[in-house]
Amino acid sequence: MINKNTADKYNPVNEGRKGKLRLDFNENTLGCSPKVIAAIKKIAAEELASYPEYAAFKKKLAKYLKVDVNNLMLTNGADEAISLVFNAYLKRNDTVIIPTPSFEMLNVYAQNLGAKIVSIPYNKKESDKDNSSVKNEFIFPTEALLTAINPKTKLVVLVNPNNPTGTAIAKDDIIKIIQKAKKNKSIVLIDEAYYEFYGRSSLGLLNKYNNLIIIRTFSKAFGLAGLRLGYAIADKNRINEIKKISSPYNVNSIAVIAANAALNDTGFIKKYVNGINESKKFIESELNKLGIKTFNSEANFLIADFGENSSKVVTGLAKAGILVRDRSKIPLLKDCVRITLGTKEQSSMLIDEIKKILRERVILFDMDGVLVDVRNSYRLAIKKTAEFFTKQKITNKEIQSFKEKGGYNNDWDLTEAVISSKRVSIKKQDIIKKFQEFYNILRNNEKFILKREALKNLYKKYTLRIVTGRPKAEAYYVLNRFNVLGFFDAVICMEDCKKKQKPDPFGINLALKRLGVRKTSKNSAIYIGDSIDDINAAKNAGIRSIGILSSNVNSRSLKKLMLNNGAIKILEDINQLDINKLVSVIT
């Protein structure tokens, strides 16, 4: 398809980005090697007052690339390399083939020369939309591109891996393209800006094909975007042709000094790239949990399909000081956002903010009797401990009566109250010790009540947190045992609450505070509990609640109590929760 040169413009945001988490232009978010900073600090006044000298650095770079120094030229960023190649081999009405979507400056440079652009669209392979763990893939249009090459073709441009799709081009396909281009006396330009992340190059083809030009940059993996240093590698005759239209001092001295130091610390780059690959796995995994599609990428960025929420995500992240790139206007990338991969810490910040944006509605859960069946663990431990010290039979009805009175959210306190009601006095520490002996034997009797599929669906739509009176170790034990901890953004436990137990709202307020929920937006949160203390804690925190009649309780009085104290609904089982109807409840 021929692009009619509608004077596209490349308008990157180039102001006001400092101090923010820059995940929008595929820069190195960690920064350059410390050796670079040290080298720059040692620059003498003479070096700044003199025109740049390139010979020593070019020799070092050629050795790094394992090419002859005559096959190499430095440029003011990879952008200048592209511009020089276009100016050297294209003139008005010449044909250039560019797969699309790709780096936007390719079209800009071609249009400025009045060249005819043949755009070859990437293909898109769709996965099952209901299976977010399976990635969609962009497919390089090999056959269509080969078909498009003809005697009128002056230049074929490939970006490998491609920006913005992250797609890599198979070596066999590259060879086919170079060979057909050679037959038609065409040049093939390959932009390898993201080579360090992909690890594969077409450099090995240079000795065989003199119609191949490769460009790279120090802007990405090396973290020197601000110094604008790129380079072109090609047959020495091609390099000489390009040099004819190049300024003799196009690269500044500081850039050369910095790049020279960077090449002295390739271990820094390898470590950085490994970290980026770990971040990629983490972000893909976390986005997939949220039902967000991601695409295979061999670069230091990835494409994520946020559907109708794409604009909301970009805007929301910007407000939080995190910059990403909205690519949704590109037809193939409808509803998509490009995310530069940062460090693991930066990636965690990103995911936390995305969760806040996508899951503004918050569900807080009590644990015992709501998510976990404790009839044969905590409840039985209360009964056995009380019977041990009182030598009397204790019924579940008696235990429940104390629950309904309120003020006994802590099972140790409840056990003490039951014992005291039998006119038996036991030291609290002795009660706790015996209770824990029984519980540690009984804890593997616990069952997770909420069905896993329902939990997954809740996680996609809501922020999920737990506010429980359990000790932290016991809460995490059961969540890890049932492999559900990852669905909850936080677990507020007994130790977090500074001895302030429900109905005190401290734990709920702490959970909301960590989410950044303001008082004016508490109508976006709801608490689900199984006791009068849970309902009152929610009321005291200023949020709504849903009551659960635990499986060991069949009490009309508890149901009435919870409703009278503000519960908007009573369910007999957490699995009766209507996920979709919650949207109208939590606004």
Image (cartoon, grey):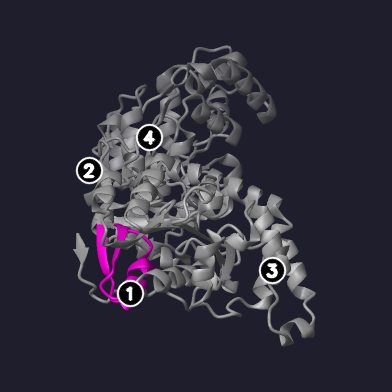
The reply to whether dot 1 and dot 4 touch (C-beta < 8 Å) is no
Amino acid found under the numbered disc labelled 1: Lys
* SS at circle 4: loop
State how far apart marks 1 and 4 are (Cα): 76 Å
- The residue drawn where x is 49% and y is 78% is 245
* SS at circle 3: helix
Which residue bears the numbered disc 2? Answer: 580
Relative image position of residue 62 (x, y in whole percent): 65, 58
On residue 91, the disc is 1
Determine whether 422 is above or below 259 in the image. above
In the displayed structure image, the side of residue 274 where residue 450 appears, left or right = left
Quadrant where the N terminus lies?
Answer: bottom left
Asked if residue 433 shows in the view, the reply is yes
Which residue bears the numbered disc 4? Answer: 530
Q: Earlier in the sequence, mark 2 or mark 3?
A: 3
Determine whether 365 is above or below 193 in the image. above
* SS at circle 2: loop
Amino acid found under the numbered disc labelled 3: Ala
Of residues 41 and 483, the one nearer the viewer is: 41
Q: Residues within 10 Å of mark 2 (few under 14, many from 20)?
A: few
On residue 258, the disc is 3
Amino acid found under the numbered disc labelled 4: Asp
State how far apart marks 4 and 2 are (Cα): 22 Å
Which quarter of the picture shows residue 110? bottom left
State how far apart marks 3 and 1 are (Cα): 35 Å
